[in-house]
Image (cartoon, grey):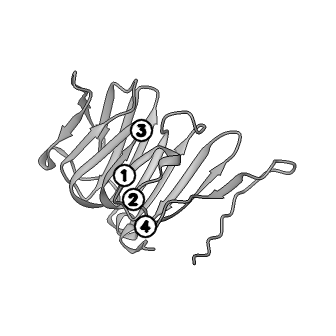
Amino acid sequence: MALLSVLIPRAPGQLPPEIRGLNIGKGKGLSLSTPRYHDFVLWSGIAAPQEDLQAADFEWVWVRRPSTDHPIERAFLLHGSRFSAKDLDVNTKRPVEFIAISVQDKALSIDIFPSAEIRVRPPTGVDRIAVNGRSYPLGSEKVLTVPQQGVSALAAPRDEIDRCKYVRH
């Protein structure tokens, strides 16, 4: 049994979000919906088909979509190497501490630590991908693979990055 508290700031008169647990077998998760966005959080899980997540080996996954039927807008993944959703695949050659993903307009931005070879199948409509701030062209196959030596070091203070090591379930 797990206990989880969710704090959501609201303006007076604003309706609370709809929160529901996800039935995903051994893993744990929940979804949170408001009129502006749909989030889901997964920990210790491998898939959440009701959220269009086919596979993940990350210990903790957070995904935001504008609504349940829209592509991923943001995601944050802790401690793993594989994330496969209906509209986005991200795989690294070895486990990483975190991957932060943001999709805006036709651009996909990924921050990864530590550097590792990464393979990305972006959402439909994305034509530019940046990994740790460095842009890469998206070929005709619509999949980008960047070798480890092509992934620049993340430009963030080391003490901020180190905090991710201690977030465990």
Q: Quadrant of the N terminus?
A: bottom right
Q: Secondary structure at mark 4?
A: loop
Q: As shown in the figure, which amino acid type bears the numbered disc 2? A: Ile
N-term mark: 4 or 3: 4
Q: What residue is pinned by disc 3?
A: 86
N-term mark: 1 or 4: 4
Q: As shown in the figure, which amino acid type bears the numbered disc 4? A: Ser
Q: Position of residue 149 (x, y in %)?
A: 12, 48
Q: As shown in the figure, which amino acid type bears the numbered disc 1? A: Ala
Q: Disc 2 versus disc 1: distance between alpha carbons? A: 5 Å
Q: Residues within 10 Å of mark 2 (few under 14, many from 20)?
A: many
N-term mark: 2 or 3: 2
Q: Position of residue 13 (x, y in %)?
A: 87, 48
Q: What residue is pinned by disc 1?
A: 55
Q: Are marks 4 and 3 in contact (CB under 8 Å)?
A: no
Q: Nearer the viewer, residue 154 or 147?
A: 147
Q: Disc 4 versus disc 3: distance between alpha carbons? A: 20 Å
Q: Nearer the viewer, residue 136 or 28?
A: 28
Q: As shown in the figure, which amino acid type bears the numbered disc 3? A: Lys
18 up-or-down from 27: above or below: above
Q: What residue is pinned by disc 4?
A: 44
Q: What residue is pinned by disc 2?
A: 46
Q: Quadrant of the C terminus?
A: bottom left
Q: Position of residue 78 (x, y in %)?
A: 38, 61
Q: Secondary structure at mark 2?
A: loop
Q: Disc 3 versus disc 1: distance between alpha carbons? A: 10 Å
